[in-house]
Image (cartoon, rainbow, N blue to C red):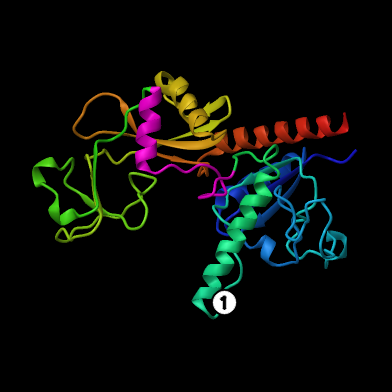
């Protein structure tokens, strides 16, 4: 009987993904494949989404012949889209393709690769650790407004923040902190994500956050297991990850510089940085348990 299989998809420079794959290979419980965000752009891929193949008629027949995966060339990426993996950990926010000369071609290819990734992962959602979302293939990635709402629902605190679409018109008396941070297009997903802007306030989006102490505490949530969580917050942090739909997440905590007392949540990520051996061991063990359980169900 072959070993259970684990597929890890990650950005090319993801050190955490390499560490997970290395640890899993060392433990030798599962067969491990590590691939980057370009993996599916290197070979011909034939994927039928749950909505059906293009050109399929009402009777279920195909209007035109479709090539089969068996007829495609040997895969240089090492990833077989048709293989029944036992568990998939996707740490890549999107799938990518090679660069094109025309910007419009780049944008079109990026959109197509992301749509393919969403459909391919969603059709395998029973074995994917964090279910993909239209905005992020690695799982739900709420912006800071979503973080604040989710935290309030489970009794966790977040920093005071003032979010404005026009920084030049904000009443200075309403500012929650001395530092202005610009944001363009979308609201940041982390209180530390937006860079500090020291220039004059312009007629552009900006946010102000209450002053926080510099230390950050990254807490790993891996289903029922938590690593580095303050005991008083462990239950609520687990509820927070569950409410967002993230079996695997990193929740970053900080302390307010002006408010003594407890900690505040400054960010939630579906891609934990995996800082330390304890966090790596917990994630590796969970992947092994998931993969083994799926293989046993498949055999039964």
Residue 216 seen by the camera = no
Residue on which the image places disc 1: 100
Q: Which residue is found at the position 70% from the left and 49% from the top?
A: 51
Depicted 105 relative to depicted 150: above or below? below
Q: Which residues are magenta?
A: 132-154
Residue nearer the viewer, 137 or 267? 137
Residue nearer the viewer, 262 or 206? 206
Q: Could you tell whether 101 is left or right of 51 in the image?
A: left
Displayed quadrant of residue 256: top left
Where the C terminus falls, by quadrant? top right
Residue nearer the viewer, 102 or 271? 102
Depicted 187 relative to depicted 113: above or below? above
Extreme-front residue of the structure: 58
Depicted 85 relative to depicted 300: above or below? below
Q: Which residue is found at the position 69% from the left and 61% from the top?
A: 40
Residue 155, given in percent of the width and then of the height, sits at 36, 22
Residue 182, given in percent of the width and then of the height, sits at 27, 55
Where the N terminus falls, by quadrant? top right
Taking the magenta stretch, the answer to whether it contains residue 142 is yes
Q: Which residue is found at the position 10% from the left and 46% from the top?
A: 172
Depicted 160 relative to depicted 153: above or below? below
Q: Could you tell whether 130 is left or right of 88 in the image?
A: left
Extreme-bottom residue of the structure: 101
Q: Could you tell whether 172 is left or right of 229 in the image?
A: left
Q: Secondary structure at mark 1?
A: loop
Residue 99, given in percent of the width and then of the height, sits at 57, 74
């Amino acid at each position: 009987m072959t070993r259970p299989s684990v597929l890890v998809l990650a950005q090319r420079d993801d050190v955490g993904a390499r560490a997970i794959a290395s640890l899993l290979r060392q433990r030798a419980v599962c067969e491990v494949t590590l691939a980057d965000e370009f993996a599916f752009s290197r070979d011909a891929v034939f994927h039928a989404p749950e909505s059906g193949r293009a050109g399929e008629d009402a009777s279920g027949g195909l209007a035109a012949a479709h090539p089969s995966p068996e007829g495609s060339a040997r895969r240089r990426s090492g990833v077989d889209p048709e293989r029944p993996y036992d568990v998939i950990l996707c740490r890549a926010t999107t799938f990518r393709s090679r660069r094109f000369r025309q910007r419009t071609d780049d944008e079109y290819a990026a959109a197509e690769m992301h749509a393919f990734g969403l459909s391919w992962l969603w059709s395998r959602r029973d074995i994917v650790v964090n279910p993909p979302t239209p905005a992020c293939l690695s799982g739900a990635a709420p912006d800071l407004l979503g973080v604040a709402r989710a935290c309030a629902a489970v009794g966790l605190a977040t920093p005071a923040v003032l979010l404005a679409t026009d920084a030049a018109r904000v009443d200075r008396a309403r500012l929650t902190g001395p530092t202005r941070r610009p944001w363009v297009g979308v609201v940041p997903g982390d209180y530390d994500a937006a860079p500090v802007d020291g220039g004059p306030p312009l007629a552009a989006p900006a946010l102000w956050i209450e002053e926080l102490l510099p230390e950050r505490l990254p807490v790993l949530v891996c289903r029922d297991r938590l690593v580095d969580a303050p005991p008083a917050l462990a239950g609520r942090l687990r509820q927070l990850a569950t409410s967002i739909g993230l079996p695997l997440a990193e929740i970053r905590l900080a302390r307010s510089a002006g408010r003594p007392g407890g900690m505040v949540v400054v960010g939630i990520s579906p891609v934990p940085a995996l800082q330390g051996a304890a966090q790596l061991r917990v994630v590796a063990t969970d992947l092994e348990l998931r993969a083994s359980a799926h293989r046993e169900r498949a055999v039964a």
